Image (cartoon, coloured by chain):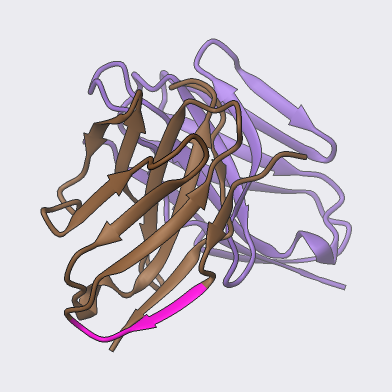
Amino acid sequence: KQEVTQIPAALSVPEGENLVLNCSFTDSAIYNLQWFRQDPGKGLTSLLLIQSSQREQTSGRLNASLDKSSGRSTLYIAASQPGDSATYLCAGGPSAGAGSYQLTFGKGTKLSVIP
Amino acid sequence: EPEVTQTPSHQVTQMGQEVILRCVPISNHLYFYWYRQILGQKVEFLVSFYNNEISEKSEIFDDQFSVERPDGSNFTLKIRSTKLEDSAMYFCASSASVTGELFFGEGSRLTVL
């Protein structure tokens, strides 16, 4: 069964700082890994999807990497802004090994960017 | 930009009552999902639906739960007899392919009293 862990659980940084959020997963047979943003009481906004054949994806100030062999993904946020404050969720995608369609989520990293 | 829409945004119900949560997935998507998030906990998979049938379900998705695509646009989650522990945010999601990007709705908050 897939397990997804995110470290740290919470992070507070001053505005302008570059930062890295970490995600680890146990089932390396995933087809993809997806990063989401969740604002309090709101839905999940997809940030980046990395297919298993890819090493990284970039969108604006965000860059996500995937290393299936080590079971790790990182989300890099450049030049952080107060508007980046939210909870960031990592989700391991459908698994060829488990024959499963589901995403398995981590508990998230709550990011606070201080002006 | 296409989006997944969910109604209601918040529903309060008495224990034992039936609840139907509604979703309109993105129009050209073929795979549909329900997830839930109990306050302070992880987002959990409930069920996936493709080609008018359930393709996978979790242990949470017991006989009290059912899903339906009654027409070409709506996707519903029914809880027959709600329990206190069903209180959660329920998210609908859709994707164009099984390995494609998942898009989530804003969620329906269910409170069972």
> What residue is rendered at 25% in x and 18% in y?
A97
Q: How many numbered marks appear?
A: 0
> What residue is rendered at 49% in x and 76% in y?
B10
Q: Is residue B47 left or right of residue A50?
A: left
Quarter occupied by residue B52: top left
Q: Is residue A29 above or below residue B59?
A: above
Q: Nearer the viewer, residue B71 or B40?
A: B71
Chain shown in brown: B
The reply to whether the magenta stretch includes residue A85 is: no
Q: Is residue B19 above or below residue B44?
A: below
Start-end of magenta stretch = B10-15
Q: Nearer the viewer, residue B48 or A1?
A: B48
The image position of residue B90, as x and y in percent, is 41, 61
The reply to whether the magenta stretch includes residue B12 is: yes
Q: Quadrant of the N terminus of chain B?
A: top right
Q: Nearer the viewer, residue B9 or A6?
A: B9
> What residue is rendered at 41% in x and 72% in y?
B40
Chain A colour is purple
